[in-house]
Amino acid sequence: MPALALVLAVQAGAADAVGLGPLRHEGVTASERKGFYLTLSNPYADAQRFRLAAVGWDDEIAQPRVLLPIATPRLGGGSQRRLLVVATGLKQGETLSFRVCAERDDPQAKELIHARVCAKLVARRVA
């Protein structure tokens, strides 16, 4: 029975996790910049500050060529915000693959799971 209680607690914690979408997006551009819109969602009842980061596709290396509108946006309870993420410095024929991740800036000690969600983005410049 304790295992069932743990599973239920984990499921309840996962339901209150930051939202970020779409989780995968690709785009082609003729210029050195490619923009993507992502939607950040606050599932909590009260206002929260979230931490955003642009990192590598398979690692946690920061991506300085990816511009985020604000590193720690604050959203009201139950609200959403569209974010414009811009990949810059694309050379002709280059493909840049990266992730944008979001998590609550001040996780609560009582939470069983520290939720973080990442969108995988691919920007390609035509040759």
Image: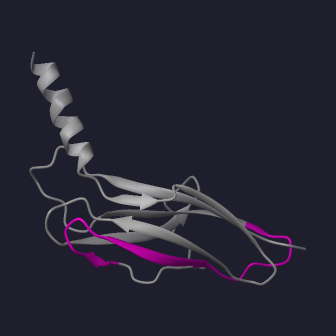
Residue 5: give x, y in percent of width and height: 12, 26
111 or 79: nearer the viewer: 79
In the rendered view, tell whether residue 118 sits above or below residue 2.
below
User: Does the stretch in magenta take in 83?
Assistant: yes
Q: Residue at x 46, y 57 (%)?
A: 118
Furthest residue in direction top, as rendered:
1
Residue 63: give x, y in percent of width and height: 56, 72
Residue 30: give x, y in percent of width and height: 82, 80
Q: Quadrant of the C terminus?
A: bottom right
Q: Residue at x 20, y 44 (%)?
A: 13
User: Does the stretch in magenta take in 38?
Assistant: no
- Corner quadrant of residue 3: top left
Query: Is 36 on the left-hand or right-hand side of 17?
Result: right
Furthest residue in direction right, as rendered:
127
Query: Is 124 on the left-hand or right-hand side of 117?
Result: right
Total number of numbered labels?
A: 0
Report whether residue 113 is seen: no
In the rendered view, tell whether residue 9 sits above or below residue 48.
above
- How does the figure colour the protein chain or chains? one colour
Residue 124: give x, y in percent of width and height: 76, 68
Span highlighted in magenta in the image: 72-95
Q: Residue at x 38, y 79 (%)?
A: 71
Query: Is 97 on the left-hand or right-hand side of 2?
Result: right
17 or 114: nearer the viewer: 17
Q: Quadrant of the N terminus?
A: top left
In the rendered view, tell whether residue 114 sits above or below residue 105.
above
Q: Residue at x 69, y 82 (%)?
A: 33
In the rendered view, tell whether residue 3 sits above or below residue 43.
above
Report whether residue 100 is seen: yes
